Amino acid sequence: MDSLALSCLILLSLPLLPFLSAANIPLGSTLSSTSNNSSWISPSRDFAFGFRQLNNNSDLFLLAIWFNKMPERTIIWHANEDNHPVLAPRGSTLELTATGLLLKDPGGQAIWDEKPNKIVSDAAMLDTGNFVLIASGNHSDYAWQSFKSPTDTILPTQILDLGSVLVSRLTETNLSKGRFELHFSNGSLQLIPVAWPTPSQYKSYYTSNTCSANSSESGHQLVFNKSADIYIENNNGQIVQLPQRYQLSPFSSNIGL
Ligand SMILES: *[C@@H]1O[C@H](CO)[C@@H](O)[C@H](O)[C@H]1NC(C)=O
Ligand SMILES: *[C@@H]1O[C@H](CO)[C@@H](O)[C@H](O)[C@H]1NC(C)=O
Ligand SMILES: *[C@@H]1O[C@H](CO)[C@@H](O)[C@H](O)[C@H]1NC(C)=O
Ligand SMILES: *[C@@H]1O[C@H](CO)[C@@H](O)[C@H](O)[C@H]1NC(C)=O
Ligand SMILES: *[C@@H]1O[C@H](CO)[C@@H](O)[C@H](O)[C@H]1NC(C)=O
Ligand SMILES: *[C@@H]1O[C@H](CO)[C@@H](O)[C@H](O)[C@H]1NC(C)=O
Ligand SMILES: *[C@@H]1O[C@H](CO)[C@@H](O)[C@H](O)[C@H]1NC(C)=O
Ligand SMILES: *[C@@H]1O[C@H](CO)[C@@H](O)[C@H](O)[C@H]1NC(C)=O
């Protein structure tokens, strides 16, 4: 399981396509967890958002985003509560409405929702892997986006704000909260092992030390840029590179730290 240490940071050699080439999903659209094929696909077909059967013959489904062209169809985001995947019984439905996303079980009971504080006009699965709810009245404003609610993976062009947390999955196939956490808070990036199954955190095994009493010198954003460099940008715009061993080489995925 050590190889899963921060399977958080996955890197891909995907051709990065223009941002907004998206076929938008209108309000009232639904997906149903009756087969693996219920999904909304990005224009390049690289990414899909929808239901995934938990495992063969399972009557439980995940609501997820995955690499649609890779045979493994690796999941990069999943709907969760407190880092535990939301399991939707067969026949559940997801609806896109002006108030956001609503997932209901076959009895009509709500089991998960995403209610942004802005009215939604439509949604899109972008070619970057970001699933976005577009704010009404301003098409460049996202009422919600999966890139700002990461689970265990970040992708090129994704930017994490202070307060972001990534939690590794327990095993390759079990998406429950696992043994490693990435925290970007208080100006610094920290990688922390957890005393699983308790939530107790051990001492961090990496800290970027970018928290400064002078706030202009403190970390502001964690950037995974288009050419797949990961760095911290301070409030004053200065870039702090992560050490080489926390950088990922192209053409590999699932790098353990
Ligand atoms: C999914 O769709 C593809 C193409 O339409 C089809 O070949 C495949 O059998 C479908 N799989 C399931 C599980 O429905
Ligand atoms: C649905 O997809 C999952 C994950 O790729 C796979 O394990 C399962 O066999 C698929 N189910 C069907 C009916 O194709
Ligand atoms: C799940 O089903 C798929 C397609 O039906 C098959 O290729 C795969 O080997 C099965 N996986 C397991 C673990 O049984
Ligand atoms: C639309 O949203 C973008 C992104 O949040 C913002 O930069 C821009 O100022 C907004 N435009 C208007 C007219 O509010
Ligand atoms: C994943 O692991 C957790 C914790 O051990 C367990 O409770 C859960 O049943 C597992 N889920 C699956 C799908 O195996
Ligand atoms: C944030 O960093 C400052 C300066 O290092 C430290 O005094 C403070 O305790 C930290 N706060 C948290 C919540 O970690
Ligand atoms: C904080 O850092 C900036 C440079 O990033 C410097 O210009 C400024 O003088 C510093 N402020 C204090 C109070 O040290
Ligand atoms: C990504 O960051 C690296 C290192 O800071 C920089 O050399 C490169 O130009 C950046 N790429 C893009 C597309 O901004």
Image (tube, grey):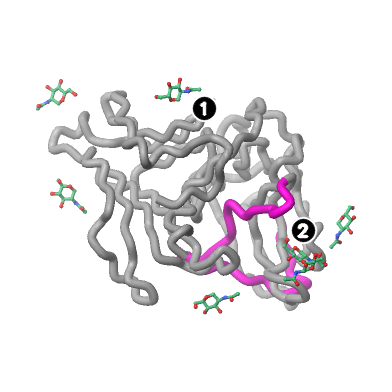
**Quarter, ligand 8:** top left
Count of marks placed on residues: 2
Judging by the rendered image, the residue that carries numbered circle 1 is 227
Q: Which region of the structure is painted magenta?
A: 70-96
Q: Is mark 2 within 8 Å of ligand 1?
A: no
Q: Is residue 61 above or below residue 157?
A: below
What residue is shown at x 64% (from left), y 52% (from top)? 65
Q: CA distance from mark 2 to mark 1?
A: 34 Å
Q: Residues within 10 Å of mark 2 (few under 14, many from 20)?
A: many
Judging by the rendered image, the residue that carries numbered circle 2 is 31
Q: Is mark 1 within 8 Å of ligand 8?
A: yes
Q: Position of residue 116 (x, y in %)?
A: 53, 50
Does the magenta run of residues contain 85?
yes
Q: Secondary structure at mark 2?
A: strand
| Quarter holding residue 210 | top left
Q: Position of residue 228 (x, y in %)?
A: 50, 32
Q: Amino acid at mark 2?
A: Leu
